[in-house]
Amino acid sequence: MGCFYCDAHHEGREAIMLRVGEMKAGVLYLFKDQSHRGRCVLALKNHRRELCECPPEELADFADDLSRASGAVKELWGCTKLNLASFGDTNPHLHFHIVPKYEGGFEFGGSFQITNPQPEILPAGEYERMIAALKEKLDI
C-alpha cells in the first residue's frame, strides 16, 4: 500500500519508532529519539486522513485510546506537561504525537520540533523496559 502506518513493515517507520501494541482504535508506537522521555505516537488502525472522517464509535474509541496512552506516559515518566498534536501534511494517515515536556528540560516553554537535531537514542534494553511498562499500564 505504501502507507507509513498501514504497511506491516515500513522502513521509514521502523527507523524512527518501535511498536508498543494495539489499542481499541489505534496502534501505539514509541519513538527511538527519547529527547522527550516517553514520546509516543498513536496512529488510527484504519486508514483515514482526518479526524472528521471517523464514524462516531471509532472516534470515541480513538479519543479514549489517546487519553489512556497520554495518561500512561504522564504517570510512568512524570512529565510536567503533555503536548498532543496531529501533523499530516506529508503523512496523510491520522495520528497524534504524544510529547511529554519537563520543566527545565529540552524545549520546555518553546515550540516542538518534529525532528531533534541531537536525538537521544537509548540502549535497546531501555526501550524494552519502556515498552513493557506501557503494555502493563495499558493492558495491551
Image (cartoon, rainbow, N blue to C red):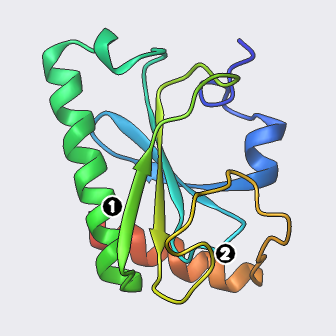
Q: Which residue is mark 1?
A: 70
N-terminal of the pair, mark 2 or mark 1, is 2
* Picture quadrant of residue 70: bottom left
Q: Does residue 128 sit above or below 24 in this rendering?
A: below
Q: What amino acid is at disc 1?
A: Ser
User: Looking at the image, which residue is at 34% across and 21% down?
Assistant: 51
- The image shows residue 98 at horizontal and vertical percentages of 45, 56
In front of the other: label 2 or label 1? 2
Q: Is residue 37 visible?
A: yes
Q: Residue at x 49, y 16 (%)?
A: 47
Q: Name the residue rendered at 46%, 69% in the picture.
A: 100
Residue 127, numbered circle: none
Q: Secondary structure at mark 2?
A: loop
- For disc 2, the marked residue is 35
36 left or right of 97 in image: right
Q: Is residue 14 above or below residue 18?
A: above
Q: Which of the image's four quarters has the C terminus?
A: bottom left
